Amino acid sequence: LHVDRQVIGCSDHDGEQAYNLDGEEMWFADFIKKEGVEPQPPFVDHMTYVDRAYQGAEVNQQICKTSLDVVRRAMKDFKIED
């Protein structure tokens, strides 16, 4: 069995999207260089993600930031409890 994991996260100033297989990073979005990166070592059969994976990551960041704003507004009147 394999463990396949996708991570999408954001903040007001930063974001992340990455794909992992069995604990190894297979692809991540570099939002500074505006491209997808496949940091696979040269001794493995290289896996390539679809051409539009980076564009999808940018869309996911916009969705994440919109959701963050919605949750922030919904939770603004909640008191922090121990």
Image: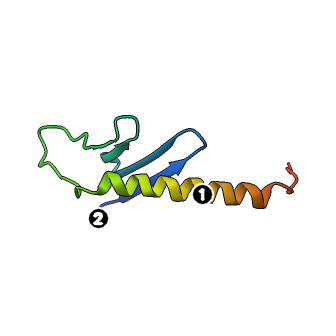
Residue tagged 2: 1
Q: x%, y% of residue 61?
A: 49, 52
Question: On residue 66, which mark appears?
Answer: 1
Q: In the image, what residue occupies the spot 42% across and 49% down?
A: 17
Q: Which element is circle 1 on?
A: helix
Image spot of residue 18 (x, y percent): 38, 49
Quarter of the rendering containing residue 39:
top left
Spatial separation of the CA atoms under disc 1 and disc 2: 35 Å
Type of amino acid under label 2: Leu
Q: Is residue 21 above or below residue 43?
A: below
Q: Residue furthest bottom?
A: 1
- Residue drawn at x 35%, y 41% as measured from the top left: 34
Direction from residue 41 to residue 70 in the image, left or right: right
Q: Which mark is residue 8?
A: none
Could you tell me the amino acid type at mark 1? Thr
Residue 21 visible? The answer is no
When asked about the image quadrant of residue 70, the answer is: bottom right
Residue depicted at x 35% and y 59%: 3
Secondary structure at badge 2 equals loop
Label 1: few (<14), some (14–19) or many (≥20) C-alpha neighbours in 10 Å: few
- The mark closer to the camera, 1 or 2, is 1
The furthest residue to the top: 32
